[in-house]
Amino acid sequence: MKRLVNLKPRPATRWLLGALPFALLALLYLGLSSQRLADNPSDRLLPSPATMAESFLRLASEPSARTGARLLWSDTFASLERLFAGVAISAVLALVIGLACGALPLVRAKLSPLVTVVSLIPPMAILPILFIAFGTDELAKVALIVIGVTPFLIRDLQGHALRVPAEQWVKAQTLGASSWQLILRLLLPQLMPRLISSVRLALGSAWLFLIAAEAIAAQEGLGYRIFLVRRYLAMDVILPYVAWITLLAFLIDQALAWISRRGFPWFHAEEKDA
Amino acid sequence: MSQTPLLLARGVEKRYGDVPVLERLDFRVDAGEFVTLVGASGCGKTTLLKMLLGTERPSRGELLLEGAPLPDEPGVDRGVVFQRYSVFPHLTALDNLVLAEEFALAPLTARLFGAARRQARERAAANLAEVGLGQAMARYPYQLSGGMQQRLALAQALTMRPRLLLLDEPFGALDPGIRLEMHALITRLWRERSLTIFMVTHDLREAFTLGTRVWVFDRLRHDPQVPDAFGATITYDLPVAARTKATPDIPSPLIKESHA
Ligand SMILES: Nc1ncnc2c1ncn2[C@@H]1O[C@H](COP(=O)(O)OP(=O)(O)OP(=O)(O)O)[C@@H](O)[C@H]1O
Ligand SMILES: [Mg+2]
């Protein structure tokens, strides 16, 4: 008998193992939902899959009476725009600061304490400040994501920048690299896949900040919709929206993973599961 | 050849805080010598290489490269191969070799384009073929064996034609068979290119087969109460009669014979 740690699932088995928890959850929901609906057909708490599909399709295809937009798509578009803007700004900021801190001891000495302190501020606590400073439109929501996510990215990248082996720094200098060239050809390419993996980790918090900001002040957006229909206990909208957000998050995560594997094969060479 | 030695050390001493690591280093090394450094672990061999590289400075005394004080940061006049992490993991073998030329020719972008790029790649390919990596040009370091990685590291260290080549246990992690191949390679490169080499090794046989000169590091003075009271120095400086110096004026037939 092999040790447990050496037993690896085959691809088909692995797929099944991954799908099993989902199937169990779905079964559990179906059981509970049909039971409640049998007791009370107008129950709103655990709507049947058919009701949810119907509501979801309605939001996706019928123009809203008030704005004329198809709500699912306008919500999705608004949310993704904020999410991408926030995460992109964070990533660029983190990359620039991470590169500077990682490469230049002079910058590191100046910036590190600041980054450490800023990263300890709970972003949600300053959301009111953001609304006061930037108004309640797009800027405040993007700013919340940026403030919430950037310090984490900077600290992560700076850590990785400092872990580039000293031997490589020395070697590059013996090949004649200037400081700028060291950043460009040694540090930047080695940090890019790190940035992608940090962003993948940070996307969870980015969604959290996005939905929180949308819940408080917005006219459209996935988070806004969920918190709006909560008043009517419209679980038939909330649950599909949550599933939709999860699907979007999953697709973004997989897209980033794919880009990283394609662009930086050397980075993924040591990973256990590709 | 000029009168000034390639490398001169005068009363060099290195201490970390209060702990002396190396002391009383006085030596002279001429162009074409192959110095091998042996000694117990922790006696300061790597520290000496670091001072030659410029990543550490002597606490006292001076190191002169061709009569001028050694620069206190790494530069193209001193090439290096470490036991590990000597090549860039994010570049293919070929790109690893092209890199130095890109640094030299493209200060701003550190990348070459068009004809310059093609020529640089051709030169790099020739250099790779010379160290036996002709078939592995498109591979990343993680796709190379340990021996191939060190061949790549050697070829890379030589791209800028350094005055000194510093090797810190470059073959320490390799199998005995591969190690012999590497000995043949380094001997050939040393002779063909008239290199001056400093090589740290833990293998005495390696030290005596490769070096023209073997330096043995040890502590001369010892205080049983305070083991760290004194630093190590070069206790023996042994010439190896069987090895001739790689000076440019060696007649070429001799060169051809000796690496057969
Ligand atoms: N940055 C440092 N700070 C303090 N002490 C150091 C530092 N670097 C090295 N030392 C000390 O200097 C001594 C010599 O180290 P060095 O790495 O030169 O030894 P070595 O001869 O290369 O050993 P090995 O054969 O194991 O590689 C060791 O005692 C080590 O603890
Ligand atoms: Mg050492």
Image: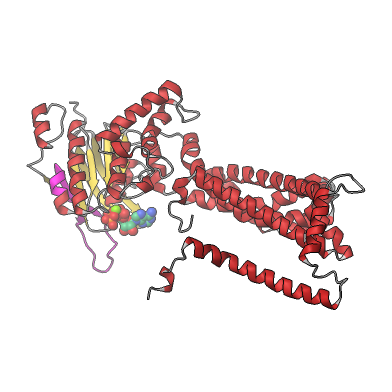
Q: List x then y, in percent, for residue A92.
A: 62, 42
Tally of marks:
0
Instruction: Identify the residue at horizontal 74%, vertical 51% (top origin).
Output: A144
Q: List x then y, in percent, for residue A30.
A: 73, 71
Q: Quadrant of the N terminus of chain A?
A: bottom left
Magenta part of the chain: B207-235
Furthest toward the right, the residue is: A66
Tell me where residue A100 sits by quadrant. top right
Q: Quick check: B253 left or right of B98?
A: left
Instruction: Identify the residue at horizontal 86%, vertical 72% (top origin).
Output: A43
Q: List x then y, in percent, for residue B6.
A: 23, 33
Is residue B253 shown above or below A248? Answer: above
Q: List x then y, in percent, for residue B156.
A: 33, 37
The colour mode here is: secondary structure
Tell me where residue B54 sits by quadrant. top left
- Front position in the image: B24 or B199: B199
Instruction: Identify the residue at horizontal 35%, vertical 33% (top origin).
Output: B76
